[in-house]
Image (tube, helix red, strand yellow):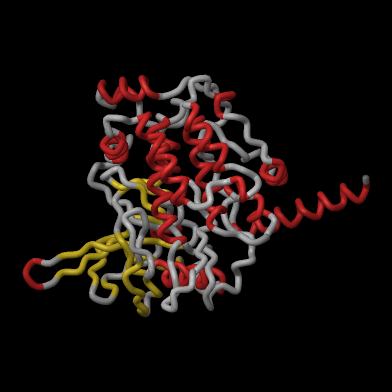
């Protein structure tokens, strides 16, 4: 861990929780593992999340933390992360959250860099789980029964975590939009540029189909092994999304499953009306694909094995929910295929499509910040208007 993060004092206790240690640190927040014990041998492990001192006084950072707490308290689904309570101490404001022992999709893809895409069944399984979780979030209602109109707005490999059971959990609702009193910034362009939908990029109205689009990008990149919209210059990324530059997956992978390709292309429709109407529809479509790709149902156990066998990380290490890339797990070098069981290697080789790619499925460089993305989008829009006027 870098000196910057290591010098942050670790609290001894947070409310009734004993702090066992820091388990993740990102650009805005840090996460500790906490333990609460009770009568009769009761014990609960949780994640304790707080803002870093460098951003603790920033209004936007505190707003995002409170938004995550407010929405997380309503989330209750096996593919989501719940917030159990908020504790104010002299050491800061802490969110008490589910502790997920696992690793993000971005971390796993970085480790597999250079070895081609994941098996289609693996990626379909991950995205299907995430779609079920997002559908539950999209269906949240106020006490009066009115829809909360919740949209995550930042679905990406960094915010999809696989736990040790091979189950996907969606992280970080800090920039989500919803119809409540904490939504004055819902109109702000937020999220990771390469995973934004065209309507999100334009700063227009977003709904659940925006998250469907982002899941489509994850599905495309994971199954082809290459980036979809990401370009070396942000303005080129903006244009690629606007134009809907989506090469058919079979142009990259000759053996790409036909039904999976239909699902991917529908999720990535530039027109929201052309996409799946809900994350539930996407999840059901992927369940049908998985019946063909994984008839024996081995995908969950294979993903659990993959999560539990990092290249040079101790098997007992805990990775808590942070909603931001951790400072240390991403530094693991790619594990060598020979270190895996022979049966696992044969299974992967048998089911992975043959693809030729030029870029990895997840960038090694740090994604642009929300503020940078917003500025880039504004500049790109102005540039486009000037060019149109000049013509």
Q: Is residue 130 above or below residue 152?
A: above
Inspect this view and state whether residue 312 appears. no
Quarter occupied by residue 249: top right
| Residue in the picture at 61% in, 43% down | 269
Q: Position of residue 252 (x, y in %)?
A: 56, 24
Is 191 situated left or right of 379 in this image? Answer: left
| Residue in the picture at 37% in, 34% down | 290
Q: Is residue 12 above or below residue 372?
A: below
Image quadrant holding the C terminus, namely top right
| Residue in the picture at 54% in, 22% down | 356
Q: Position of residue 211 (x, y in %)?
A: 52, 52
Q: Position of residue 90 (x, y in %)?
A: 37, 79
Looking at the picture, tell me which residue is in the foreground, 347 or 105.
Answer: 347
Is 86 situated left or right of 139 in this image? Answer: left
Quarter occupied by residue 133: bottom left
Q: Position of residue 217 (x, y in %)?
A: 54, 42
Quarter occupied by residue 266: top right
């Amino acid at each position: 861990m870098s000196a910057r993060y290591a010098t942050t004092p670790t609290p001894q206790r947070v409310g009734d929780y004993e702090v066992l240690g820091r388990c993740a640190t990102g650009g805005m927040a840090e996460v500790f593992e906490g333990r609460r014990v009770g009568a009769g041998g009761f014990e609960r492990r949780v994640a304790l999340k707080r803002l870093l001192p460098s951003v603790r006084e920033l209004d936007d950072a505190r707003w995002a933390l409170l938004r995550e707490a407010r929405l997380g308290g309503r989330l209750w689904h096996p593919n989501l992360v719940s917030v159990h309570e908020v504790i104010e101490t002299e050491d800061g404001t802490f969110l008490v959250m589910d502790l997920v022992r696992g690793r993000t999709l971005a971390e796993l893809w970085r480790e597999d860099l250079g070895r081609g895409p994941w098996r289609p069944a693996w990626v379909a399984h991950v995205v299907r789980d995430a779609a079920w979780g997002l559908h539950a979030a999209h269906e949240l209602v106020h006490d009066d029964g009115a829809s909360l109109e919740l949209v995550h707005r930042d679905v990406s490999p960094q915010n999809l975590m696989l736990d040790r059971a091979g189950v996907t959990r969606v992280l970080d609702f800090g920039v989500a939009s919803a119809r409540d009193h904490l939504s004055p910034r819902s109109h702000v362009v937020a999220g990771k540029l390469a995973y934004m939908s065209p309507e999100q990029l334009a700063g227009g109205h977003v709904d659940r189909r925006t998250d469907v689009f982002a899941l489509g990008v994850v599905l495309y990149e994971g199954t082809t092994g290459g980036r979809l919209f990401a370009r070396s210059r942000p303005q080129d990324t903006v244009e690629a999304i606007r134009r809907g530059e989506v090469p058919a997956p079979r142009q990259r992978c000759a053996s790409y499953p036909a039904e999976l390709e239909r699902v991917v292309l529908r999720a990535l429709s530039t027109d929201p009306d052309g996409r799946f109407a809900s994350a539930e529809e996407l999840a059901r479509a992927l369940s049908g694909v998985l019946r063909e790709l994984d008839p024996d149902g081995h995908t969950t156990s294979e993903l659990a094995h993959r999560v539990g066998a990092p290249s040079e990380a101790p098997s007992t290490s805990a990775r808590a929910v942070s909603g931001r890339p951790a400072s240390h797990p991403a530094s693991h070098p790619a594990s060598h295929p020979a270190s895996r069981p022979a049966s696992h290697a044969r299974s992967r080789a048998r089911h992975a499509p043959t693809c030729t790619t030029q870029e990895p499925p997840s960038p090694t460089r740090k994604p642009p910040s929300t503020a940078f993305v917003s500025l880039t989008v504004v500049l790109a829009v102005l540039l486009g208007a000037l060019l149109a006027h000049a013509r």
